[in-house]
Image (cartoon, rainbow, N blue to C red):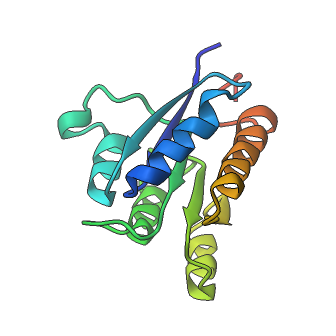
Amino acid sequence: MQPVQILLVEDSPDDILLTEEALSDARIANDLHSVMDGEAAMAFLRREGDYTGAPQPDLVILDLNLPKKDGREVLKEIREDPGLTSLPVIVLSTSAAAEDIAGSYAQHVNAYIQKPVDFDEFLRVVRSMEEFWLSIVKLPGRDGA
């Protein structure tokens, strides 16, 4: 079976490293790709510019507070693009604001997770996402779905 392709859209190098560490010993083979702003995320997803050879992700992990184009705009564009609309997106953000949570679900995010500040808790959350999204959930385009 091919590795699950994950796109991490995160502007914090530390959080990218933590996510890489948490997924490196995953039971399910995965390839983690990361971009640091919303414009790069959309270019990756649409395979434009520097990302013409990028794989189509099976799952997107999206921060809301991004440079150039924030995660709210990225989520809206994903849901409005016929080629991306069914792509599972998990928001992983420090924001606990009710309007961010409600707005994300209004844009049909698949899950909203508040990013923990504690190192061990962050690893636990990412590993829990991996367990659920890569081991339990059937993703579109995989396993005949």
Could you say which quadrant of the image residue 114 lies in?
bottom right
Q: Quadrant of residue 25?
A: top right
Residue 39 screen position, x and y as percent: 27, 56
Q: Position of residue 97 (x, y in %)?
A: 59, 85
Residue placed farthest to the bottom in the image?
Answer: 98
Q: Is residue 138 left or right of residue 14?
A: right
- From the viewer's side, name the closer residue of 100 and 120: 120
> Which residue is located at x 68 percent, y 60 percent?
111
| Left/right of residue 45 with respect to residue 136 in the rendered view | left
Q: Quadrant of the C terminus?
A: top right
Q: Quadrant of residue 71?
A: bottom left
- Residue 98 seen in this snapshot: yes
Considering the image in quadrants, where does the N terminus appear? top right
**Relative to residue 18, is residue 51 depicted above or below?**
above
Give the residue at x 71% y 22%.
143
32 and 17: which one is in front? Answer: 17
> Between 93 and 45, which is closer to the camera in this rendering?
93
**Picture layout, residue 142 above or below residue 41:** above
Q: Tell me the residue at 29%/66% (across/down).
A: 67
User: Residue 31 placed where, x, y %?
Assistant: 51, 27
